[in-house]
Amino acid sequence: MNTSKLIELPKFLDARGNLSFAQNNTHIPFEIKRTYWLYDVPGGENRGGHAYKETEEFVIALSGSFDVIVDDGKEKKTFHLNRSYYGLYIPKGMWREMKNFSTNSLALEFASTKYDPADYIRDYNEFLKLKEDGKI
Ligand code: TYD
């Protein structure tokens, strides 16, 4: 089942500037082991066409906007991220793509694992086969 979902984060509106935050287990449904960010994405480029065997992720559009397409092998969901107080939770075993980055967009990602190239599935047909066989 495609259980990816948007999670609204706390938001403190203030004339001095707004503040939002996210923390382990309260908003982000896993323990954060790593964070990384995507920036200076040229117009028309796509990122993240792959799945992870184990890694869960939480994505925030800190600035600008972009689309995240999450595919469980049967159902695809498209999320348009354009507010810094929403995060998208992506469970493990999902094919995920990021598209339509606006100028100066900034994507912050939290991950449940340290970086491991062996956790990546980069071939879509292999992803579908692993899903069919119940291996991911
Ligand atoms: P990759 O995950 O392939 O980017 P995308 O899915 O957006 O196309 O990562 C690009 C490069 O960055 C790749 O050479 C591996 C490196 N990388 C790290 O070293 N650590 C990390 O945490 C991540 C996400 C990537």
Image (cartoon, rainbow, N blue to C red):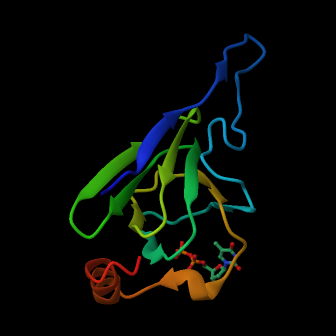
In terms of image quadrants, where is residue 95? Answer: bottom left
Q: Is residue 131 above or below residue 65?
A: below
Picture quarter with ligand 1: bottom right
In terms of image quadrants, where is residue 37? Answer: bottom right
Q: Nearer the viewer, residue 69 or 73?
A: 73
Q: Quadrant of the N terminus?
A: bottom left
Residue 82, visible in the rendered structure = no
Image coords of residue 112 (percent x, y): 66, 62
Q: Nearer the viewer, residue 45 or 35?
A: 35
Q: Quadrant of the C terminus?
A: bottom left
In the picture as drawn, the residue positioned furthest to the top comes out as 15
Image coords of residue 108 (percent x, y): 64, 53
Residue name at image x 58 percent, y 32 percent:
85
Residue 108, visible in the rendered structure = yes
In the picture as drawn, the residue positioned furthest to the front comes out as 134
Q: Is residue 72 above or below residue 131?
A: above
Q: Is residue 34 above or below residue 119?
A: above
In the picture as drawn, the residue positioned furthest to the right comes out as 16
Q: How many marks?
A: 0
Image coords of residue 118 (percent x, y): 59, 88
Q: Is residue 1 above or below residue 130?
A: above
Q: Nearer the viewer, residue 69 or 43?
A: 69
Residue name at image x 58 percent, y 36 percent:
84
Horizontal side of residue 121 vs 24, given as left or right: left
Image coords of residue 119 (percent x, y): 57, 82
